[in-house]
Amino acid sequence: MNADVLGALTRYWGYESFRPLQERIVGSLLEGRDACVVMPTGGGKSLCYQLPAAMSDGKTGIVVSPLIALMQDQMAQLTQMGIPAAVLNSSLSQPEQSKVLRQASAGEFRLVYVSPERLAREDMVQWLKQVPIAFFAIDEAHCISEWGHEFRPEYRQLSSLRAHFPDRPIAAFTASATRQVRHDIIDQLRLKNPDKYIASFHRPNLRYTVRECPSGTQTQLLLRAMRNYTSSNVIVYAPTIRRVEETVDLLEEQGIQAIGYHGKMDAQARRQNQEKWMSDEVRVLVGTIAFGLGINKAAVRAVIHLSLPKSIEQYYQEAGRAGRDGLAADCVLLWQKKDVGLLTYFIEQMEDPAEKERSWQRYHTVRRFVESRKCRHMQICEHFGEKAKWQSCGACDICGAVPAWLAEPVAAPRRKRRAAVAAAAAVGASSRGTALITGGVKANAVVSGDNNEELREYLREWRRMTAREQGIAAFLIMHDTSLEELCRRQPLTMSELRRVSGFGDRKTELYGAAILEALSRFKNGARPSAATSTVAPSEETARLLGEGKTFEEIANIRGRQVSSVASLVADLLERGEIDFQPEWILEGHRRQIEEACGRLGMERLKPLKDALPEQVSYGEIRVVIANLRRQKHAD
């Protein structure tokens, strides 16, 4: 191992050794060679281009990244480590952009992050020719391929990099690319005899479980899961914005703190919710596929999908956000027959015949994955072109590893969603505290090697408070893996702290004294503050209705979509917890909905929506149906 490279790894990152393939990839970039790198989520891709850039005195690594938030996070992390870095995107004012352009031209940054759209501009290309470039790193490189599951046309323009900068190395990085996509990446970027690094797609610490949920049972299983992972970080993926908001409300009604994340939230709200989850202020995050890119949280014990994914690549990437610390984690896919209709509907809306055909191929691959009786790990590996070396993985439902909470039978409720919730709550109450999982792993147990949960929570609280004071994200101060090691080692001196993984020179200088002081306070009796309780969504909505607020006003106050508020109001009506108020629904709309219900029945919403004027919303239909059912029950 090159002593200079290892010295930089220890000095900046506080790590004593590399993960598999990292050292060789760093070597390729330092030696000026092109590279194509496929490494799973959590495998440490960013270090592979950040470290050689940090070692390139007077030169700059140009990183192409698709998301502003991801660029800003990485820049902030590098700054915390003492590595000069900058971003060039629309979040900067014009004077700020001009300053970055001047400094970069003078070689003052080791890394500069740019978007693919900006890099395609002629003025940007001319400016880059003045920058002392060490190499180009293309993050999320599968976006350049039409066969990639997240194809973005603006990535295609990166093919001009080789023509403009023929002597600069280009390295492509992705977590999920099939053999076909890898070949396309190399062709599109015109990589010259690239070094190819393909890490194994086998994640043996992850247990894949797939369950088709008969009508009404998915909610019960979700609540069972939440009570199984009571002290763990969990991601729940929902297919639509409305489903995200309904799921958050559902969980909070059951006393399970959760927050949402989706594309229609404003950027600040998304950022705040992400940070609450990252800092363990709230353990459960419910999001659409908009959540997760670039998320660097190691101790996620479960990722739960509430619908069929669009592709194996998408599922692998999202499920792979569990267990990045190498410890056991669950990836549970709870799908329903209606998911098929939703996926096929979206595919049929596509106008490009070639893209439609590729989407159909992905759809059929996903159907085979969930319906096959073949080892899940084997199916995933073979999809990406890796030959499995086992017959039975021992870590998926097909090979006999099923969580105990999922193995128990579930009785399907007759009709109402709230009936499912009530049944699930009863199941959860009877099984609370039972964490046994086939294979001997306890999902909600402390798996870090010590049992000092109070110290862990105390340090999390210290991290949250410090981040708030500094106006930065908590993970920038220290990652979960470093926090866990602090709990194990409990260092007494700066030199002992320096040996904790993740504490390089700069980070030790910034936070070392405060961390040692926090550990000392804990030993002297200090304890984490008690968690604050939250008002149930139904209580808050009922209170706001009582104050005369409209559905739109309640949606703004609660940070929800109007349709989600209407669904919750319908639930409250049907349960008899509130009374219907005529001002909620336009009189003409109410009469039209009631007349349509008399003709078509109330079991299915779509025929009603199709039969009504376009201005009548699904939310209004739900509220009127709930009132009719309540009246019928009363009679």
Image: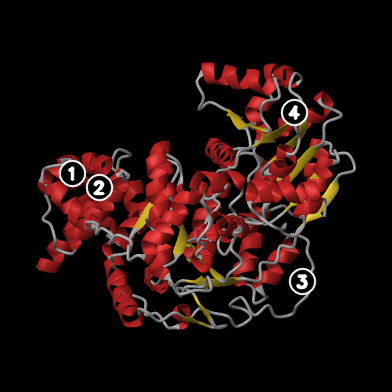
Q: Is residue 301 visible?
A: no
> What mark, if any, has residue 620 been given in the picture?
2
Crowd rating for badge 4 (residues with CA inside 10 Å; few <14, some 14–19, many 20+): some
Neighbour tally class for label 2: few under 14, some 14-19, many 20 plus, Cα within 10 Å: many
At a point 64% along the width and 17% down the height, the residue shown is 102
The residue lying at 78 percent from left, 53 percent from top is: 23
Whether residues under marks 4 and 1 lie with C-beta atoms below 8 angstroms apart, the answer is no
Q: CA distance from mark 1 to mark 3?
A: 58 Å
Residue 19, above or below 230? above
How far is disc 4 from disc 1 in space, using C-alphas? 66 Å
* Quadrant of the snapshot with the N terminus: bottom right
Which of the marked residues, 2 or 1, is nearer the chain's N terminus? Answer: 1
- Spatial CA span between label 2 and label 3: 52 Å
Which mark lies nearer to you, 1 or 3? 3
Q: Which residue is mark 3?
A: 388
x and y percentages locating residue 60 in the rendered image: 72, 30
Q: Amino acid at mark 4?
A: Gly
